[in-house]
Image: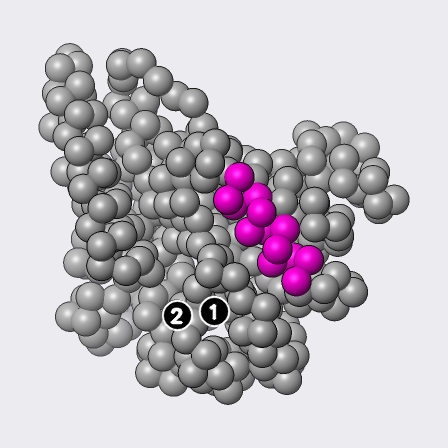
Amino acid sequence: MITGPITSFDQYLRRVPKVELHCHFEGTVRASTFAELARKHGTRLPTEDVGRLYDYGTIYQFLEIFALVSSTLIDREDFARTAYESLADGAELGNLRYREMFFNPTLHTRRGVPMATCVEGLVEGIRAAEADYGVQCRLIADIYRQDDPQTALAMVDEVLACRAPEVIGLGMDGAEAPDPPEKFKDAFARARRGGLRLTSHAAEDGPAANVLTCLDELGCERVDHGYHVLASPAAVARCRDEGVFFTCCPTSTSVVYGWPELSAHPIRAMVEAGLRVTLNSDDPTMFATDIGEEYARMCPAMGAGPQEVRRLVLTGVEAAWLGGPERAALRAELEAELDRLDEQLAGLPGAPA
Ligand SMILES: [Zn+2]
C-alpha cells in the first residue's frame, strides 16, 4: 500500500482516492497468474515469455488474447483468485476505493463453466479484497457484441437467476463497428425489468449515433468510452445538457485507436466541451497500466491541476450506481482524503495549483 507524504505531483495523482467504473475483470488478470492458470489447465500459450503474453496491436488481436485469458478461468477458485488480485492491484497501485467491474459471462458459459461458478468465484474474491484492502466492488455483466441476440437474452436470464447482491448492472462490449447497439434492444429491456442498471460501450470505434441509440433505445444511464460523440455537435450538446456520464480510458484507447499523444486524446476535448468524464483503466494488465498510472499519464497531458483532478474523482462518485447514503458516505470519505492530499501538494515547491 502506498503511504507516507507525497513528494511530487505524479505521486499525488497515484495517491488520490479513486472510483473506477470501466474495468473488465478478464483484462485485469496478471500475466504471471495467466501463465500459472494456463499451466494448471493445460492451455497452450503463444509464447513462453510472460513479459510478452500481452503483446498485440489491434482491437481484434486484443480480443483474441482476451478470449485466451478467459479460457484459463475454469474453477471457482480461479475466479476468486483473479478477482482478489485485480482489486489488490487497484488498491495498492492507485488507491482504488470503489469499482464497478465488467465481466463477460458468455466467454465462460460457452466453454461449459456454469454461471454460478463464475459469479460465486468473483464474489468470493471481491469480499476477500474488501476485507483486506477496504476496496468495494460491484459487478456488471457484459453482453459480448459478437454474440447473437438470443445468446445475450439467455445470458441476462441466467444472470438474473443466480444474482448475488454484488451484481448490479448490464453492459456491452466487444468490437462495436460490426455489431450496432440496437441488435441487443431486447436483452437490455429484459435486464431493466429485472432491476439491473444499464450502460454500454458506444462511439468507441462506431459513430456518434450509437451514443443516442444507447440512451434512447437501450435505456443506458452511462456511456463507456464515447469519444466519437465529438463528431456530432448536436449529440455533444444533448449529452452535456442531460449530464450523461462517460467512462473514458486513456491508455487502452491510445494504443488501440492510435492516439499516442494523450494531450491530443479526445478525452481532453470531451472535458473541454463540458461533458461529465471519469478516468478508468479498462484492461489494465493487458495494457501495462493501472488506475494510478491512468491519472498520472492523463492529468498532466490535459493540463489538469488539483481542482480538475478532484472533479474527475467526484464525477466517478456521482456516476456510480450507489444508493443515496452509500454515495454520501463515499463522497465524504474521498473529499476528506482529497483535502489532506491537496494540503500536502500545496506545500511542494512548483506543484500545480
Ligand atoms: Zn472497455
Query: In the picture provided, is 310 more to the left or to the right than 132?
Result: left
In this view, 12 is above or below 126: above
Distance (Cα) linking label 2 and label 1: 6 Å
Q: Percent from the top left, x then y, of residue 170?
A: 47, 69
Camera sees residue 266: no
Dot 2 lies on which element? strand
Viewer-closest of 78 and 258:
78
The amino acid type found where label 2 is placed reads Arg
- In front here: 320 or 56? 320
Q: Residue at x 28, y 60 (%)?
A: 323
Label 1 Cα neighbours within 10 Å, binned few <14 / some 14-19 / many ≥20: many
Mark 2 crowd level (few <14, some 14–19, many ≥20, 10 Å Cα): many
- The reply to whether the C-beta atoms of the residues labelled 2 and 1 are less than 8 Å apart is yes
> Residue 197, labelled with which disc?
2
| Residue highlighted by disc 1 | 170
**Mark nearer the N terminus (2 vs 1):** 1
Q: Quadrant of residue 261?
A: top left
Residue 341 at x, y percent in the picture: 20, 25
Which image quarter is the N terminus in?
A: top left
Residue 257 is covered by the magenta coloring? no
Task: Locate residue 140 relative to residue 81 in the image: left or right.
Answer: left
Specify the label residue 345 is tagged with: none
